[in-house]
Image (tube, rainbow, N blue to C red):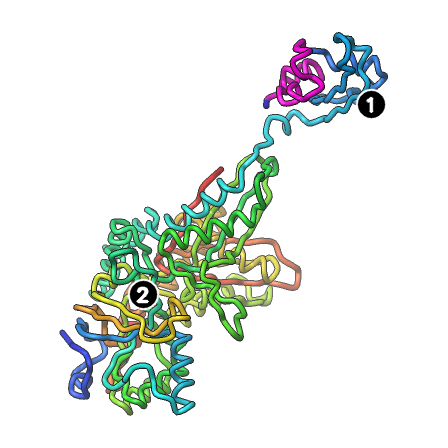
Amino acid sequence: MSADTSRAGCGLLAYCPEVFRTRELDNSYPEVYNPRHMLQRRGHRDRVFRGRGDATIGLLLLDTSRRPDPSRLVASRCFVFSKERLDNVKEIHASEIAETVARLCIESNYYLGEDVLAALGKYREAEVSPVGREVLDQILDNARIAREQQMPLCQDCGLTVVFLELGQEVHVVGGGLNDAIFEGVRRGYKDGYLRKSMVTQPFSARINTKDNTPPVIHTDVVPGDELRIVLAPKGGGSENMSQLGMLKPADGRTGVINFVVEAVRRAGANPCPPIIVGVGVGGSAEKCVWLAKRSLLRHVGQPNPDPELAELEAEILERVNRIGIGPAGLGGLTTALAVHVDTFPCHIASMPVAVNIQCHSARHKEAVL
Amino acid sequence: MEISTPLTDEIVAQLRAGDKVSITGIIYVGRDAAHKRLVAALDAGQPLPFDPQGQIIYYMGPAPAKPGEPIGSAGPTTSGRMDPYAPRLLAVGLKGMIGKGNRSAPVREAMRQHKAVYMGATGGAGALIAKSIKSSEVVAYDDLGAEALRRLEVESFPAIVINDIYGGDAYEDGVKQYNRE
């Protein structure tokens, strides 16, 4: 549907064939009427049209027993939409969302991103530890095998984390948005021969849900008429090394750096180094951890656009790679491929710092509907 | 060096932290939930579903096998989570463990006492490692899905000795060598 707002309120039937096809206006009166004129005659003008630059869709109920005559208008309903709404409202079917999510589950688990491959290759050249080089070769080889054989890069196909940017002009039809994502995860993990790793009753029975649901879904409502889905399977080994510290404001920049370096040191070989270190600073406790996680979606090594943060990232990376953990924790220069820092304003009393560590199998794929 | 299973005290005594090994033979697979059941069985005085004498346990939960394949992606999981259970299994004859990440002091002590080794496989290289697995069957706890106890037949399975019976630790050695702080 499109609207020519220069003729707002006029020629409704030409804009809106589905209204034209309603029973009352069916083929008996194929002429296009001017609803404004009709409404004027019924004294509706002021209420509906005055002062608006809007396009109008009206449903006119005519007395159809006689020939067309505006004076026979017996009822009217008008729906007023802004031009923007009329132009931009987009329907996305739940089945399309489910299908896309299923595809992203499989693709993210089979194909390592070009950015990750490039970073691994770069560090492979610079690594001085022979065993470190060998491990990096294995990791690159593993990515090739997974791609060629269409199998998951890692047996841990992760907890499925989904970041949604939902355009406010999007209307999801044919089912619920979250239900569609659950369905996509179910299908993707089954069809892709991916490991199902989710258990219910976390501190007691720990029963596998057998379809990797539920995913963890973060939804942002943004301007526009698109739905952006970023799907990031996250392995347990690296996720377990996450840290949240509610630091004092007095701890400052040095406090942030030390907190991150110690988190990486403590993680050692566990999170499958070389890692990508996601760091959140500021916000509330939960916002801070979310920032750290979301920063991992950036292209590996793409610096934060804020020069102060880019400098902090470079400094932490340098510090982390001095520890010597190295690939697979066996010693070497390559402990981290990148450090990504994102910030958010915080309370005068607080300085939360969160570390979310990503293993070298840094998997995420996105789609825009 | 090439080693084949089951392991003996003689083989274990030859292995030193940092040694690259290539394992051929039968290895068992179990992770968190299977370990909990194995130790519960020991606690209850019940027999284990496999004879641990001289055996290796690989800490791993595979991805499902595609049709025609013995197994899906099959890399190691973090060993530290099995630390509470490992000394019990070492005490009844287990000789080797494969995983990733360091072990607790009690586990390292139990390894020295019972003459066993801990080996590391490359985490996140599950597709590569799967190529060395020739067959896989569930031995017990099928209801655990990916966490079931399995028996694998492996050929040239790539690993590195992390902890030997002499107190060596390849992770500590590696970090010490490359630390520039």
Which residue was labeled with disc 1? A47
Q: Nearer the viewer, residue A207 or A340?
A: A207
Kindly identify which numbered label has been placed on residue A348: none
Q: Secondary structure at mark 2?
A: loop
Q: Nearer the viewer, residue A311 or A292?
A: A292
Q: Nearer the viewer, residue B4 or A280?
A: B4
Q: Which residues are the magenta region? A: A2-31
Q: In the rendered structure, which amino acid carries the disc numbered 2?
A: Gly
Which residue was labeled with disc 2? B123
- At label 2, counting other C-alpha atoms closer than 10 Å, the crowd grade (few under 14, some 14-19, many 20 or more) is many
Residue A44: image x %, image y %?
83, 19
On-image quarter of the C terminus of chain B? bottom left
Q: Is residue B181 visible?
A: no
Horizontal relation, residue A247 to residue A25: left or right: left
Which quadrant would residue B94 be assigned to in this image? bottom left
**Vertical relation: A14 (above or below) B3:** above
**Chain under disc 1:** A
The answer to whether residue B38 is magenta is no
